Amino acid sequence: MSPTPGHGPGQAATPGTRPALLLSMGPGMAERLLAPRHHARLAALARTDPRLVAHDLTAPAPAVAAALATAEVLLTCWDAPPLTGRVLERAPRLRAVVHAAGSVKEHITPACWERGIAVSSAAGANALPVAEYTLAAILLANKRVLHAARRYRSLRTAHDWHRELAAAGNYHRTVGVIGASRTGRRVIELLRPFDLRVLLHDPYVDAADAGRLGARAVPLDELCAASGVVSVHAPALPATRHLLGAAQLALLPDGATLVNTARGSLVDEAALVTELRGGRISAVLDVTEPELPHPASPLYDLPNVLLTPHVAGSLGGELHRLADHALDELERYTRGLPFAEPVRAADLGHSA
């Protein structure tokens, strides 16, 4: 009988053992991810060479190939090479992959599930800084800070700001959250202390579940029409491509702000640029399509756009939270326990 995806023989190690482990991630990533205290803990939990990091598993260097052949666990992060069937042939002892980042879709292949390899992700830990960025964006958007700063720079004189910003503020405003993902749920949680109404659109969340989260479930068009700020947290799937198209963007009230920290493909960028050029709405965009906008993209220069280079997620010292989470999962594995944050193949069809 074939093992159930995510629950095969790689679910847990023999308790008390120090499994052989190989680091596998993009160049320079290990140095940013792992502080000295992480190296000390890693050495206590596993047998590994912290200086050996696999950037390429398709044509690995001899030292990497030797380590892969004996590895029981891979500790991965961003830009980890894909674990194809051919790569797994070189890793006969591999039982688990601990990913110190969010989505595993770029490197966990069907061959991994077929082998019954256990997979863990730090998506929950990475959701925290994204939600914090989003909270800041929502509060500043409702205060119309981007507009006020631009006008202040232009006027450079006394002005009746109370009159100009009469419609601004965070009291009893409505915020629309698209997607009850880990980040979306955390955003709703962070919004609780504020006097805001929160709407939620997610096809997998019913009215009762939304109420328990602290939001009211509504259809997408209703959310767009009623929200002063719309924040996007849905996964990038074929079904969610251009989820916010021209029709939905046209429903946003005058003065509304779109916040996107999820994926650029969720928004029809051409339709968004048309709305932004008209000056009717604003946008806070940490992600775009393509990921790096063309140098001539109007998003760089439109005065009603705050464009950031995909920095909402873990950055700088926040990477250490991901490392802490990954090592917690590794410790669970060495104690013979299941992962606290497992990834299952069945979940990938509706998750990031």
Image (cartoon, rainbow, N blue to C red):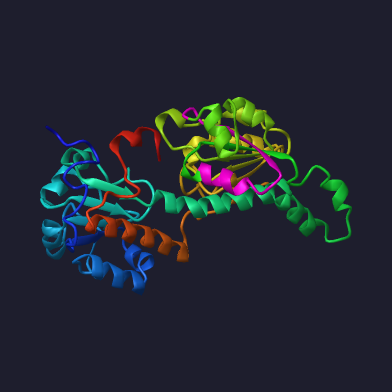
Q: Nearer the viewer, residue 320 or 339?
A: 339
- Indicate the quadrant where residue 150 lies: bottom right
The stretch drawn in magenta includes residue 187: yes
Q: Is residue 17 above or below residue 225?
A: below
Q: Nearer the viewer, residue 255 or 324?
A: 324
Pinpoint residue 232: horizontal percent, then vertical percent. 54, 39
Q: Which quadrant is home to the N terminus?
A: top left
133 displayed left or right of 118: right
Magenta-drawn segment: 184-204
Q: Is residue 285 above or below residue 245?
A: below
Identify the residue shown where x is 12% and y is 52%. Answer: 93
105 displayed left or right of 164: left
94 displayed left or right of 193: left
Q: From where the camera sits, is residue 297 visible?
A: no
Q: Is residue 309 above or below residue 188?
A: below
Q: Which quadrant is home to the C terminus?
A: top left
211 displayed left or right of 256: left
Q: From where the camera sits, is residue 319 visible?
A: yes
Pinpoint residue 284: horizontal percent, then vertical percent. 61, 47
Pinpoint residue 333: horizontal percent, then vertical percent. 24, 55
Identify the residue shown where x is 39% and y is 33%. Answer: 350
